[in-house]
Amino acid sequence: MINKIIKTTNLLVINHLIRKFENYFYVVYAMFIFELIGRKTLHFFREFGQIIILLISTFRYFPRIIKDKKLVLEQMSIIGADSLPLVLLIGAFTGAIAALQATSLFEKFNFISIARPFIGSSIATAVFQELTPVLTALVIAGRIGGSMAAQIGTMKVTEQIDALEMMAIDKNRYLAMPRAVAIILMMPVLAIFSNAVALLGSFVLSSIKYNFTSEAFFDSVIRFFKMKELMLGLLKTTVFGGVTALIGIHVGFNTKGGAEGVGNSTVRAFTLSAASILIIDAIFGYIF
């Protein structure tokens, strides 16, 4: 009888300790989650503040564009001319896919004959306002944003930036300003080329699959065309380009850890740029 009472008492004590441990574990886990959220939030605002300071420091040297035109033109060539073939390829298939999706949707509900006069304009609106700005920006973020982070990051870990400062050369004037100006100037140009080939690609697919004539397709585009749609797309592209440049430069300036750090910075620059592009695009869509 006594043994049974002792066993029962022990079980009660063990159950009580287990419950206390569970409660303690939940408290510690909750504290860990709150600490993690707080740390990430502080890190986000710290980096956001650093990017704003970089923007102001870079903008301060914009009046020197003419004096430093050689640096700017070199970056414009890298961002514009060297990226153009890839942008044209992406643009052509973007237009073709947009035409395929639009026509397939109308065909699914047997509206293709009714919607024929509006298909060209609907494709043009999607291309001008959303597809071309976002996809062009993502291409540039991968090709140029990562490249900026890698180049500047390599200069950082090899102490070349320290050497520039020893020679009284401001890194924001020599490295940041030319890249920011070049990408802001070239992104709308790339978007215009992408718009043109996207429309051409959408027309080719529409004519092959649904026998659209050039007159019917482009007449639809012209009749319902609004300059606001094109200008909004170009504005988006310019903003996306500026954000990509700032993030790539910022990540490059803060690179640490040798070759491995340069690789991590390259990936991080593209990841942050791509996420920022999509977030800003959603904000544009809500406002406009």
Image: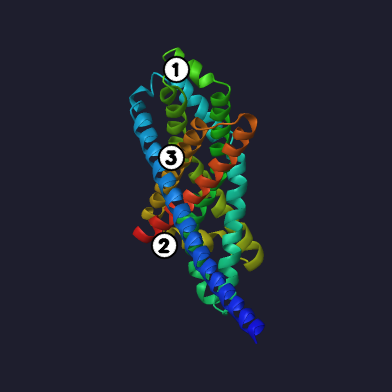
Please tell me in which quadrant of the rendered image residue 82 appears. Answer: top right
Q: Which residue is mark 3?
A: 242
Q: Residue furthest front?
A: 2
The disc labelled 2 sits on which kind of residue? Phe
Please tell me whether mark 2 or mark 3 is closer to you in this view: 3
Quarter of the image for the N terminus: give it.
Answer: bottom right
Give the answer, above or below, for where 140 lies relative to 205. above
Give 41 or 215, whichever is nearer the viewer: 41
Q: In the rendered image, is residue 95 in sight?
A: yes
Label 2's element? Answer: loop
Q: Residue furthest top?
A: 167
Q: Which residue is mark 1?
A: 165
Label 3's element? Answer: helix
Is 132 left or right of 209, judged from the image as shown?
Answer: left
Coordinates of residue 16 in the picture (x, y in percent): 54, 74
Label 1's element? Answer: helix
Q: Which residue is mark 2?
A: 224
Pointers 2 and 3 in contact (CB under 8 A)? no
Q: Within 10 Å of the Cα at label 3, are there few (<14), some (14-19), or many (20+) other Cα atoms?
A: many
Please tell me in which quadrant of the rendered image residue 242 appears. Answer: top left
Coordinates of residue 183 in the picture (x, y in percent): 47, 36
The residue sitting at 50% across, 51% down in the picture is: 275
Is 107 left or right of 172, judged from the image as shown?
Answer: right
